[in-house]
Image (tube, rainbow, N blue to C red):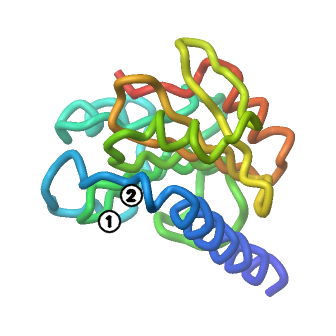
């Protein structure tokens, strides 16, 4: 029961964090880079399965690279947002149980410039010229953007220090 509440709390916190950052950059937000598509309901995949699906969707899906002992839950919404959640074997797709590393990809025209404007000097530079900003109200979420890439990426981890370390590692990139 306690674990279910923690999972629900995690999901609510993640949704709140996404809403907060969206409100910060809404004035700078452009239209989606692509039209609505058929969503992918949560599905748990192996690394090779995730790579196969990522190559077929026609848009970048970001992740933090492979992790030993993890499977990868992929969700994609009708507005082209995707989430890769790192889950241990046995977790049911779509389950709210547990708090796990998640990397979300959001279509966002002008993502880098918008993130620069809300960073107000408080962000940090990443390998490959990226910029990361920690959400001060929800430090478990680090928002990432790269120059000339029309997507914003959100790295979430139950540990704020781990979220920042993963975001700054240079491993956050489009699945190839």
Where disc 1 sits, the SS reads: strand
**Residue 126, x across and y down, in percent:** 64, 20
Disc 1: which residue: 41
Q: Residues within 10 Å of mark 2 (few under 14, many from 20)?
A: many
Looking at the image, is mark 2 or mark 1 earlier in the sequence?
Answer: 1
Residue contact at pointers 2 and 1, CB within 8 angstroms: yes
Q: Residue at x 78, y 30 (%)?
A: 165
Q: Is residue 35 left or right of residue 86?
A: left
Image quadrant in which the C terminus is located:
top left
Residue at the spot x=59%, y=57% of the render? Answer: 90
Percent of width and height locating residue 102: 59, 49
Looking at the image, which residue sits at the far bottom? 1
Q: Mark 2 and mark 1: span between their CA atoms?
A: 5 Å
Q: Position of residue 134 (x, y in %)?
A: 73, 45
**Up/down of 17 relative to 57, above or below:** below
Q: Residue at x 24, y 63 (%)?
A: 39
Residue 76 is left or right of residue 64, and the answer is left
Q: Residues within 10 Å of mark 1 (few under 14, many from 20)?
A: few
Which residue does the image show at 84% across and 82% down from the upper left?
2
> Can you tell which quarter of the image residue 147 is in?
top left
């Amino acid at each position: 029961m306690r674990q279910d509440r923690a999972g629900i709390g995690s999901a609510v916190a993640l949704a709140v964090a996404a809403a907060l950052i969206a409100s910060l950059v809404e004035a700078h937000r452009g239209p989606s880079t692509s039209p609505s598509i058929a969503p992918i309901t949560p599905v748990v995949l192996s690394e090779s399965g995730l790579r196969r699906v990522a190559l077929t969707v026609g848009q970048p899906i970001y992740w933090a690279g492979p992790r030993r002992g993890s499977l990868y839950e992929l969700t994609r919404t009708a507005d082209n947002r995707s989430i890769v959640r790192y889950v241990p074997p046995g977790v049911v797709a779509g389950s709210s149980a547990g708090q796990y590393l998640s990397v979300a990809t959001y279509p966002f025209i002008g993502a880098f410039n918008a993130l620069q404007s809300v960073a107000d000097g408080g962000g940090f530079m990443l390998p490959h010229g990226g910029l990361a900003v920690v959400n001060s109200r929800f430090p478990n979420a680090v928002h990432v953007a790269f120059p000339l890439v029309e997507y914003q990426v959100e790295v979430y981890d139950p540990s704020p220090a781990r979220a920042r370390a993963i975001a700054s590692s240079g491993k956050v990139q489009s699945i190839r």
